[in-house]
Image (spheres, rainbow, N blue to C red):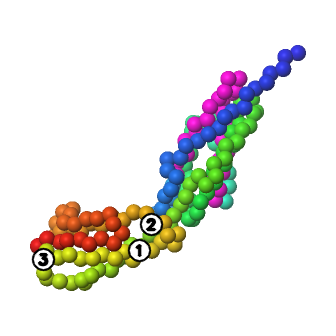
Amino acid sequence: QVITIAAKPEPEFTINQTEACLESGSAMFSFTYTGVIPTGGAAIETWIWNFGDGSGDVTLTSGGGSNGNTSHTYSSPGIYDIFLQVIDANGCTANYFEIQAVTVHTEPTAAFNTTPAASCDFPLMIDFTDASTVSDNSIAFWSWEAVEQGAPGVVVASSTLQNPSLTFPE
């Protein structure tokens, strides 16, 4: 009598990004299956993804042509765990779990104040004070650009500071 012992699959995946902001109410992530079939293993036939947001499992099959790759759109801010279960042609199952795999931030609301509010003296230096808000305090980068009136795309002053002072030529 012959007894065959099959090797379990070794599931794994990569994510195109680990953080995103909700833009127009959603944030999309792409997941690429990178698992391996060990010696004595068999081809993966089923991938069962759970994206940690209560949307339920997504099941992919080898006949679907995805090779286990998928994408998922989140509609709420939060930090999400990703769970993947694979089943190979031998019926062997294996799991891969990534804790806090993706973070979805709320979209910030840009706002600022200026001093002075108006002037006719050039060159003119204006102090900008950031008044932007976001519910999870996740603003990590600022990009200020002042363009010439009537000449879109002509940048006359710029900064990446949170509260910059910009000088405007005549």
Residue 166 % position (x, y): 23, 71
Identify the image quadrant of the C terminus: bottom left
Q: Hey, what amino acid is under mark 2?
A: Ile
Check disc 1 and report the residue beneath it: 132
Image position of 151 with respect to 130: above or below: above
The disc placed on residue 122 is: 3
Residue 79 % position (x, y): 59, 60
Comes first in the chain, label 3 or label 2: 3
Asked if labels 1 and 2 touch by Cβ distance under 8 angstroms, the answer is yes
- Left of 54 or right of it: where is 66? left
Q: Which residue is drawn at 65% across and 38% down?
A: 11
Q: Hey, what amino acid is under mark 3?
A: Phe
Mark whose residue sits in front, 1 or 3: 3
- Could you give the CA–CA distance between mark 2 and mark 1, rounded to whole angstroms? 9 Å
Asked if labels 3 and 1 touch by Cβ distance under 8 angstroms, the answer is no
- Could you give the CA–CA distance between mark 1 and mark 3, rounded to whole angstroms? 28 Å
The disc placed on residue 139 is: 2
Q: Give the range drawn in magenta.
A: 29-53
Q: Is residue 103 visible?
A: yes
142 drawn magenta = no
Q: Looking at the picture, tell me which residue is in the foreground, 29 or 132.
A: 132
Comes first in the chain, label 2 or label 1: 1
Element marked by disc 2: loop
- Could you give the CA–CA distance between mark 3 and mark 2, rounded to whole angstroms? 32 Å
Q: Is residue 152 visible?
A: no
Q: Residue at x 57, y 37 (%)?
A: 34
Bin the neighbour count of mark 1 within 10 Å (Cα to Cα): few under 14, some 14-19, many 20 and up. some
Q: Hey, what amino acid is under mark 1?
A: Ser
Q: Which residue is drawn at 48% across and 66% down?
A: 138
